[in-house]
Image (cartoon, rainbow, N blue to C red):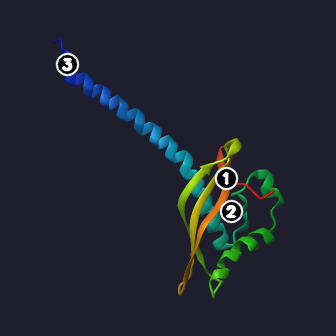
Amino acid sequence: MNKKLTAGKLAGIIFCGLALVCTVILISLNGYYSGQMKTINKFFTAVERNDFNSYKTCFSKADAETLTEADIEAARLIAEVLEDTEDFRADASFKGRKKLENGRYSVTFDIVVYNDSEKETLKDVSRILVRDGGKWVIETQA
């Protein structure tokens, strides 16, 4: 049984091959860039819970060594837009990213700070993210 390769079969094989390559590229890029927002979300989760150890993991190892409890308390000041600042949640929604020099990215997002009775939105908040040891971390202001 000698099967011939027709133009239709060849086009189908090429199409499937290109679709596979495009899918792999898109998945890789999504994983690379979605890590930036995962870091931002992890940061706000740590701030909400007042979890200093999780907070430190959002920064490079060198920067984490210099952080103090006062730093997370300063980050918790985002709740000051609410009347009841005790228990609050913060959700960040991605707006954009801009590539800077040396592999740094400025990531822009809106933050919704809320509790059971009120909600406020902080618009166009930006943080600089860099890769450190294969993961995205927030760059501290030098």
Residue 68 position within the rendered picture, expressed as x and y whole percent measured from the top left:
81, 66
Residue type at mark 2: give it: Ser
Residue 128 position within the rendered picture, expressed as x and y whole percent measured from the top left:
68, 55
Question: Which label lies toward us, 2 or 3?
Answer: 3
Residue 32 position within the rendered picture, expressed as x and y whole percent measured from the top left:
56, 45
Residue type at mark 1: give it: Leu
Name of the residue lying farthest toward the right: 66
Number of numbered discs visible in the structure rendering: 3
Residue 45 position within the rendered picture, expressed as x and y whole percent measured from the top left:
61, 67
Name of the residue lying farthest toward the left: 1
**Which residue, given by chain and number where applicable, does mark 3 sit on?**
6
Q: In the visual, does 53 lie left or right of 106? A: right
Measure the C-alpha gap from mark 2 to mark 3.
Answer: 58 Å
In the rendered structure, find residue 129 and report the number of the disc placed on it. 1
Number of residues whose C-alpha sits closer than 10 Å to that of mark 1, classed few (under 14), some (14–19) or many (20 or more): many
Q: Are the two marked residues, 2 and 1, in contact with CB atoms closer than 8 angstroms? A: no
Q: Nearer the viewer, residue 120 or 58?
A: 120
In the rendered structure, find residue 54 and report the number of the disc placed on it. 2
Element assignment for label 3: loop
Question: Which label lies toward us, 2 or 1?
Answer: 1
Residue type at mark 3: give it: Thr
Q: Nearer the viewer, residue 61 or 37?
A: 37
Q: In the visual, does 13 lie left or right of 38? A: left
Q: Are the two marked residues, 1 and 3, in contact with CB atoms closer than 8 angstroms? A: no
The quarter holding residue 53 reads bottom right
Report the residue at 60% width, 79% height from top: 88
The quarter holding residue 5 reads top left
The quarter holding residue 142 reads bottom right
Report the residue at 69% width, 44% height from top: 101
Q: Mark 2 vs mark 1: which is more N-terminal?
A: 2
